[in-house]
């Protein structure tokens, strides 16, 4: 059969026949290709002839003996030449077909060992092989159920077992062979059958190095049957657990084991006894092939380890997907496989280094801030390659293009929404559905498919693009259908017209819930960050019913801050709960959201001096000159400086007593705190309405902040001190009218030289202290 469409139609017919015994009408099957009905009917007739002949002895429970040890059995019409293989189900002999003058292979049932198989099991292999029309799978010629013993006559492959010839092949040859094997196994899977006993001995290579797959004796399609059967070295973990289903991914595991052995010459797991071997299969982790054979190509190693994942969900979803990755390698393109073992092995090997860091710190060989820097460098290795750019260990053109595309998509959707709002002539939902709705559906469907095909980085970017379209499409849909709308001019609405509070709340809630589901599904920081941002928008949309518009219009920032304050513990509790439940990737953005929310809330609360007032009614107005334009400015700026101290205190608690996932939020607060302390004083001096003593106080505080960086070992303190020292120098010169005076510049030059000399002296003293015996 050479027509691929005809082969596909036969596979469809056979699959229905095998599954439920249905005999489809060939004409109905070929409705789209009526010219194939006649040839399909002929192939079906041949298939049914073989199937019927096999059924004549179906149900025979007895096992058959092949004769005395060492005696070659005789078969009518054939001359037995030699025994060529002994397997778990039967023995294989090389025969000469006297009628057709050709070499064939004969397989007979073995009954000389414990656990001998029944004739039904043997017949199942014959029936299975009869289903195939694939050059890579041995063909059945004849089955003789009435012979003594019953014999299966099949194609003889004149070649070598893959396990014996594999080490002599070049790595590209090994990859090409296994790619063909994967494609053939996928063909079997398309008929609803799994091999379940794949191993190098069951793959023969002919003179042209073309693979031929043997021994489908354990093949089946029932996910609840077939446990503990097969060759232990190549069994998948689920084959050792009756509570787990067996499906096509079981063969993917065996294909991974075969590739592993091709790469480094040994199977993934070994044991002195079978119990030890099975325990290793259940819970063990194979060594990296490059540790055994340094020449093994890393992409092939990644493919093998991906197929060998202990959890079936983490493997390739099909043998076809594995074949595609092997094809990518053969074409010189990057493979998509990124096995989880890479992460676990890296974590295992990083752990001793982290312990060494703690030992160095205990022995005073390094400083505390150096230990923090080293730990952060190792934490960088925990980042995933399939997450967004901010979490990736490296940047690639594909990542840049993907997230740039998602960003442009978001910009386009915003401009489209804005254009719809300005152009009243545009009405109806048909156009928005085409522009925003269909891309949203398409992106999410594509992302779902790509995620199952191990294109996780692409799927995350597609999901992000889809999320950016959803809220704007919903807002346009609500506007055009008037659903949840209110009359224009209704009091208390955040927007004067176009979008009601309830429409906004439902839109944000739906988008927030969708992003939450995607974040849990993809386990990525990218989508959990979107979830975190949408939670803020959800709170703001709810506050629109409580006067958010009024607070903004009347600059009642303290009211807005007090209503946003619960968001800080909400983020923190969300993050802590998710971290405790094993979702650390979800908790980090929430902790960061808690830190940023704290900054925003406290800075809003400091506006108009309200924060100082909340602290027991304190006020700094008595220290203000009468001629200043803003009587509350000192209270406002004092509150902002107090916030800087609060940020530093919260960061210290999170850094010393918090979890590992809180470190990012701690770093953020540590970085902001010195700037939050100094910048209000800079603004105060910029007004030039207060005593010039504040100029010098600002300069002194900036220099003190730079010096304090040694004490706290925080470089952000040093940078904040330097920046603000320069600003203070400029403000002093401006306020005193010294910008055109060279004396001021000379004074700074002299001061710089004095500080440099002082630095030299401090360095010399430190060197003396470090000398032995000092």
Image (tube, rainbow, N blue to C red):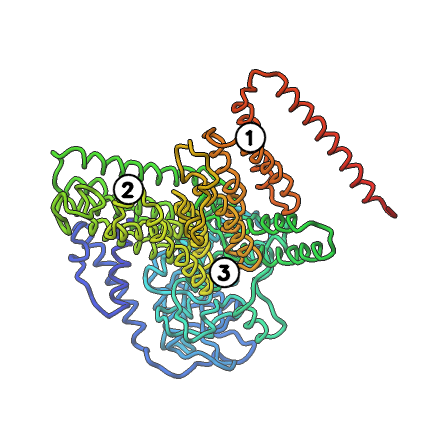
Element type at mark 2: loop
User: In the shown orientation, is residue 33 left or right of residue 674?
Assistant: left
Residue 646 picture location, percent across and down: 50, 50
Q: Residues within 10 Å of mark 2 (few under 14, many from 20)?
A: few
Task: Identify which residue, 76 or 514, lies in the foreground.
Answer: 514
Query: Against 216, is 549 above or below?
Result: above
Decide: few, some or many residues near mark 3? Use Cα within 10 Å; few <14, some 14-19, many ≥20: many
- Image marks 3 and 2: residues in contact by CB distance under 8 Å: no
Helix, strand or loop at mark 3: loop
Q: Is residue 380 above or below residue 226?
A: above
Q: Label 1 to label 2, Cα distance in Å?
A: 34 Å
325 displayed left or right of 710:
left
Please tell me the numbered disc located at residue 308. 3
Front tag of 3 and 2: 2
Q: Which residue appears at 28% of the width and 63% of the height?
A: 15
Which residue is drawn at the image coordinates 17% and 61% (left, top)? 25
Q: Quadrant of residue 316?
A: bottom left
Residue 425 in percent (x, y) is at 11, 34
Identify the mark nearer the N-term, 1 or 2.
2
Which residue is denoted by mark 1 in the rendering? 728
Q: Is residue 322 visible?
A: no
Residue marked by disc 2: 554
The reply to whether dot 1 and dot 2 touch (C-beta < 8 Å) is no
The answer to whether one can see residue 725 in this image is: yes
């Amino acid at each position: 059969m050479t027509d691929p469409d005809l082969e596909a139609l036969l596979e469809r017919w056979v699959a229905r026949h095998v599954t439920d015994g249905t005999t489809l009408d060939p004409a109905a099957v070929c409705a789209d290709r009526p010219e194939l009905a006649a040839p399909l009917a002929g192939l079906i007739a041949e298939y049914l002839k073989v199937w019927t002949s096999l059924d004549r002895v179906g149900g025979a429970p007895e096992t058959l003996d092949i004769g005395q040890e060492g005696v070659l059995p005789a078969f009518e019409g054939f001359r037995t030449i030699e025994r060529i293989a002994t397997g778990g189900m039967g023995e294989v002999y090389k025969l000469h077909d006297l009628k057709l003058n050709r070499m064939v292979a004969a397989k007979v049932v073995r009954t000389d060992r414990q656990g001998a198989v029944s004739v039904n099991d043997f017949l199942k292999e014959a029936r299975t092989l009869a289903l195939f029309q694939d050059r890579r799978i041995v063909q059945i010629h004849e089955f003789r159920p009435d012979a003594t013993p019953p014999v299966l006559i099949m194609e003889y492959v004149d070649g070598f077992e893959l396990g014996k010839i594999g080490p002599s092949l070049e790595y590209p040859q090994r990859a090409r062979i296994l790619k063909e094997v994967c494609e053939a196994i996928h063909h079997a899977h398309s008929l609803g059958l799994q091999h379940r006993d794949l191993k190098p001995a069951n793959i023969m290579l002919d003179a042209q190095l073309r693979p031929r797959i043997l021994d489908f004796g354990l093949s089946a399609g029932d996910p609840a049957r077939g446990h503990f059967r097969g060759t232990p070295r190549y069994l998948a973990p689920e084959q050792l657990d009756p509570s787990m289903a067996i499906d096509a991914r079981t063969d993917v595991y065996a294909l991974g084991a075969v590739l592993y052995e091709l790469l480094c010459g040994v199977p993934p797991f070994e044991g002195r006894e079978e119990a030890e071997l099975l325990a290793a299969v259940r819970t063990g982790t194979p060594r990296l092939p490059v540790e055994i054979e340094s020449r093994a190509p890393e992409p092939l190693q990644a493919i093998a380890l991906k197929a060998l994942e202990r959890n079936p969900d983490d493997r390739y979803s099909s043998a076809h997907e594995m074949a595609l990755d092997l094809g990518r390698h053969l074409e010189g393109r990057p493979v998509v496989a990124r096995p989880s073992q890479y992460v676990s092995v890296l974590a295992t090997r990083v752990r001793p280094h982290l312990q060494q860091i703690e030992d160095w710190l205990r022995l005073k060989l390094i400083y505390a801030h150096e230990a923090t820097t080293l730990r952060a460098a190792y934490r960088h290795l925990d980042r995933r390659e399939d997450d967004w750019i901010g979490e990736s260990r490296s940047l690639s053109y594909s990542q840049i293009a993907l997230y740039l595309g998602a960003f442009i998509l978001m910009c386009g959707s915003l401009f489209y929404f804005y254009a719809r709002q300005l152009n009243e002539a545009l009405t109806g939902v048909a156009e928005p559905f085409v522009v925003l709705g269909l891309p949203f559906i398409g992106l999410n469907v594509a992302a779902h498919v790509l995620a199952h095909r191990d294109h996780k980085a692409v799927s995350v970017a597609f999901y992000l693009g889809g999320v950016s379209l959803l809220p704007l499409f919903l807002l346009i849909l609500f506007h055009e259908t008037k659903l949840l709308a209110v009359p224009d001019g209704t009091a208390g609405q955040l927007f004067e017209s176009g979008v009601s509070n309830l429409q906004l709340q439902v839109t944000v809630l739906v988008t927030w819930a969708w992003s939450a589901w995607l974040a849990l599904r993809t386990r990525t920081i990218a989508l959990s960050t979107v979830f975190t941002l949408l939670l803020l928008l959800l709170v703001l949309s709810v506050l629109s019913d409580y006067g958010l518009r009024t607070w903004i219009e009347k600059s009642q920032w303290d009211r807005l801050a007090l209503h946003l304050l619960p968001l800080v513990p909400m983020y923190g509790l969300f993050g802590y709960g998710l971290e405790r439940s094993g979702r650390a990737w979800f908790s980090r953005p929430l902790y960061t959201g808690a830190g940023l929310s704290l900054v925003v809330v406290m800075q809003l609360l400091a506006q108009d001096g309200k924060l100082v007032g909340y602290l027991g009614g304190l006020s700094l107005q008595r220290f203000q000159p009468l001629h200043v334009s803003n009587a509350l400015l000192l209270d406002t700026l004092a509150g902002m400086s107090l916030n800087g101290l609060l940020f530093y205190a919260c960061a210290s608690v999170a850094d010393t007593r918090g979890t590992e996932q809180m470190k990012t939020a701690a770093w953020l607060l540590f970085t902001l705190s010195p700037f939050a302390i100094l910048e209000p004083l800079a603004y105060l001096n910029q007004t030039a309405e207060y005593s010039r003593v504040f100029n010098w106080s600002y300069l002194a505080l900036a220099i003190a902040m730079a010096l304090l960086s040694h004490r706290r070992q925080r470089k952000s303190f040093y940078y904040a001190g330097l920046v603000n020292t320069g600003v203070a120098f400029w403000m002093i010169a401006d306020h005193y009218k010294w910008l055109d005076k060279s004396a001021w510049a000379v004074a700074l030059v002299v001061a710089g030289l004095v500080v440099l000399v002082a630095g030299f002296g401090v360095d010399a003293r430190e060197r003396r202290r470090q000398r032995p015996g000092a």
